[in-house]
Image (spheres, rainbow, N blue to C red):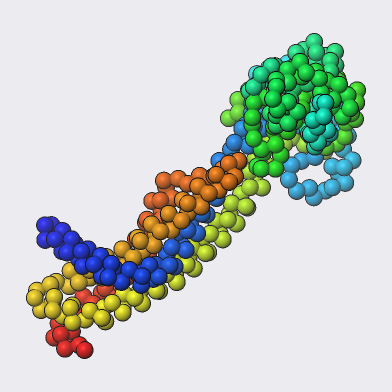
Amino acid sequence: MQRLWNEFSESSRIALTQIRANMMRSVLTALGVIIGIVAVTLMGTAINGIDVGFQNSLAMLGDDVLYVQKWPWGRVDDWWNYQNRPLIRPEMSDQLNRVIEDSRDSLLQVAVPVAARGGPVKTGENQIGGVQIVGTTANYSQMMSADFKEGRLFNDTESAGGRQVCVLGFDVAEALFPNSSPLDQSVKISGQPFTVIGVLAKQGAFLGLFSFDNQVMVPLNAYRKYFSFNSNSSQLRVKVKDKNRMEEAKEELIGAMRRVRGLLPGERDNFSINQQQAFREQLDPIKKGIAFAGLFITGLSLFVGAIGIMNITFVSVKERTKEIGTRKALGARRRSILLQFLIEAVSICLIGGLIGLTLTFSLCLILQSTMPSLPVVFSGSLVIISMVVSIATGIVSGFAPAWGASRLDPVVALRYE
């Protein structure tokens, strides 16, 4: 064992000396490995970032909430069937809640009506457009995942009476009241006055598309006074008691909604039950596409890099043929020669891997500083994978020339010119 360690140490010293002596050649040789490592780490960072951003976005939606809507999430094949469905009316929440209360051991907790549309919000000279105006009831507090920065949600009395009070999203509050508290201030929502009673804490955006901070919540009965319902805006959100039994809860909700709609056995459902799984199914092809592209670029780059390293190692063997012959004549074993050139090839790949990791880490830092809302996850597992890939590339590319060097006849090698 001691002899093997001595051979390894000596081979490592010789290999590193040669790399230092030809540093520029070594770095250029490792260029393919560098590109490959950058590709694989960027791919992993992108996929990790998508997963984290997706989980954060789903947490905002609520991972224990089912959505009763006219249209399903995702691709629609039978468009006319969905278009001819009746609207999801807010009154159905009361009927659905009665069905839930009458059901023994129900997995459903409460149904809350929600309607939404876009519109401007203004106070004084400050105005913000494209705000999501959400109408709901006081029961919405049972499924809210957001905290309040200040204030509260409207209560049962304000909700039932249609009081013109509102809760502002974080961005809306910042835009309208940049230097003061919005509480008890008046804002105009689509031209109608509402009193601010609460401000939501910052939540972020859903998959970078829809911002939860760009919304205003008002009592549903106040919403009815000024806005109409349509197929895309009206829905019921149903809180589930146990999020680990979502599929069972979904089946129960389908049965309850069929009772509310008065559907006979054999009649098709005229509503859709949506849940987070629909987003997961849409996200998977994106992740697979990124992974396929990343692996293709990585494989191509590593293949080119491995060919380059193999070529340079063959050149190095030719340049040092006399040295190999001298070492073998003095008693060096084949194993020592094999280790020397194999370590040299692996070291070049490790240098390429470290440079690639440094470049990727720098890019991640730049992205985090320029786009803080973009989830960038550079995990330790990516470092380990990169090092393993680098070592494997070095072994594969360096083995053939190293094996050839170890098999040289010392007499022939000493006479080589």
In this rendering, is residue 171 above or below 160? below
Q: Position of residue 89 (x, y in %)?
A: 85, 27
Horizontal side of residue 368 vs 339, given as left or right: right
The residue located at (70%, 22%) in the rendering is 180
Q: Position of residue 265 (x, y in %)?
A: 82, 33
The residue located at (20%, 64%) in the rendering is 13
Horizontal side of residue 186 vs 30, given as left or right: right
Residue furthest top as drawn: 157
User: Residue 379: which quarter of the image?
Assistant: top left
Q: Position of residue 152 (x, y in %)?
A: 70, 16
In this rendering, is residue 60 above or below 18? above
The residue located at (26%, 73%) in the rendering is 402
User: Residue 302: which quarter of the image?
Assistant: bottom left
Q: Is residue 366 visible?
A: yes
- Image quarter hosting the C terminus: bottom left
Residue furthest left as drawn: 330
Residue situated in front as seen by the camera: 384 or 371: 371
- Image quarter hosting the N terminus: bottom left
In this rendering, is residue 378 above or below 126? below
Q: Position of residue 196 (x, y in %)?
A: 77, 19
The residue located at (63%, 52%) in the rendering is 285
